[in-house]
Amino acid sequence: MPDHTRSVPKTRPADVVLNATLDQLLKSVDMQYDAIQTINSAVEIAATTGGARQGQVIEHPSFSGYIFLRKPEDLRVLLRVPILGRRRSIW
């Protein structure tokens, strides 16, 4: 499937910005990370380039896969290559 280009409206940065210290952000991320022990997820990967600042988006062919995470150190990503339709493992 060939790449597809479409126009998108240009945007500007938000007027309201929330503030937090680095310590507050790290504590929040650590608490969320500690609460998770395993993740098994089926994913559809859709890659795009460009965006609202450029005024157009180029959409590349999507492909499916799986992400498996088991703490403390096991992460596996299985992706189906769009052209070959074969499974590829990355870890």
Image: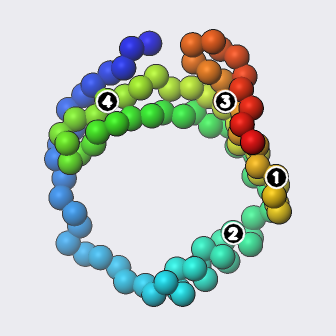
Q: Residues within 10 Å of mark 1 (few under 14, many from 20)?
A: few
Q: What's the CA distance linking mark 2 and mark 4?
A: 33 Å
Q: Would you place residue 18 above or below residue 2 in this image?
A: below
| CB-based contact (under 8 Å), mark 1 and mark 4 | no
Residue type, mark 2 in image: Tyr
Q: What's the CA distance linking mark 1 and mark 4?
A: 34 Å
> Residue 91 lies in what quarter of the image?
top right
Instruction: Tell me the element at label 2.
Output: helix
Quarter holding the N terminus is: top left
Q: Residues within 10 Å of mark 4 (few under 14, many from 20)?
A: some
| CB-based contact (under 8 Å), mark 3 and mark 2 | no
Residue 40 image position (x, y, % from top left): 76, 46
Instruction: Tell me the element at label 1.
Output: strand
Of mark 3 and mark 1, the one earlier in the sequence is 1
| CB-based contact (under 8 Å), mark 3 and mark 4 | no
Q: Would you place residue 6 above or below residue 53 in this image?
A: above
Could you say which disc has been placed on residue 30 in the image? none
Q: Is residue 19 left or right of residue 8?
A: right
Could you say which disc has been placed on residue 33 in the image? 2
> Residue 31 lies in what quarter of the image?
bottom right
Of mark 1 and mark 4, the one earlier in the sequence is 4
Q: What's the CA distance linking mark 3 and mark 2?
A: 24 Å
Residue type, mark 3 in image: Leu
Of mark 2 and mark 4, the one earlier in the sequence is 2
Could you say which disc has been placed on residue 79 in the image? 3
Residue carrying label 4: 58
